[in-house]
Amino acid sequence: MTKVKVIRMLGFAAFLASAILLGVGVLPHTERSYALSSLANGALAPDFTASGSDGAPHRLSDYRGSTVVLEWTSPVCEFTARQYESGNMQALQAYAAEHKVVWLSIDTAAPGKPGHLTEAAAVNLTRARGATITSFLFDPTGEIGQRYGAKSTPSIYIIDPSGTLVYQGAVNEQTKGDPRKAQNYVRPALEEVLSGKPVSLASTRQYGCPVEY
């Protein structure tokens, strides 16, 4: 290998390390090392049954007739923490509760993974966050996350009263600052669904921490 090639390779390695540290095009993207579905907006949202932190089973189809938000969450993700520490996620949840929107937080973390929670831990986390949600659900096998194509935490899926998927993606545009000052994607989507209008921006790129399959 020539000296020029070695220098070029070292230069690229330095750039890649900097990109990882700065979160430029590396950290926000999570690699598909597992079998994920690719759902199209306008399709019927896949039904599922999951155990909740209340110890009861919850079936998505039981909420047919209501607008539903699926929030993929994690207790160990800094991106998720930023949403809650700023109060941005709680504001969205409060708006949803005010308009009788069902909000389901889902933890897809296999046993042994850092983000795996017990029922009691999930109850305590919800209380500590000051979250206003309908239920906290567990997806330890990853089946629900894979069916929806959940790549990152936090990520959001919105389902309209007919059971149709109408939004999937990030909470807001990527920012290193206060999420409350960034363009929000979820609130406008909910406003449009509740008004009976089609969602203008129905899909955005997920970013954050990889879902712990």
Image (tube, grey):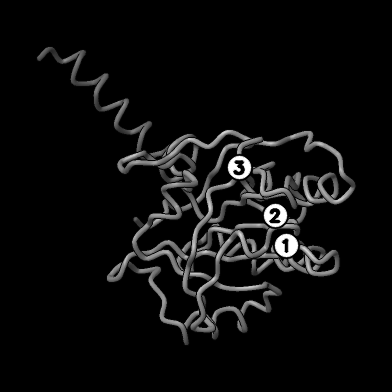
Using the rendered view, name the quadrant where residue 180 is placed: bottom right
Residue 30 higher or lower than 94, as above or below: above
Q: Which dot marks residue 44? A: 3
Residue 67 higher or lower than 100, as above or below: above
Which badge, 3 or 2, comes first in the chain's sequence? Answer: 3
Q: Which dot marks residue 88? A: 1
Look at label 1 and name its amino acid: Asn
Which badge, 1 or 3, comes first in the chain's sequence? Answer: 3
Residue annotated with mark 2? 179
Q: Nearer the viewer, residue 204 or 78?
A: 204
Please identify, in this view, whether the residue under mark 1 or under mark 2 is nearer the observer: 1
User: Where residue 38 sits: x, y (%)?
Assistant: 48, 35
Using the rendered view, name the quadrant where residue 68 is placed: bottom right
User: Where residue 56 sits: x, y (%)?
Assistant: 51, 80
User: Where residue 48 sits: x, y (%)?
Assistant: 50, 58
Q: Nearer the viewer, residue 114 or 108?
A: 108
Local secondary structure at mark 1: helix
Q: Residue at x 64, y 43 (%)?
A: 165
Which badge, 1 or 2, comes first in the chain's sequence? Answer: 1
Is residue 202 left or right of 19 when viewed as pictured? Answer: right
The residue furthest left is: 1
Look at label 3 and name its amino acid: Leu
Task: Locate the C terminus and report the quarter of the image it occupies.
Answer: bottom left
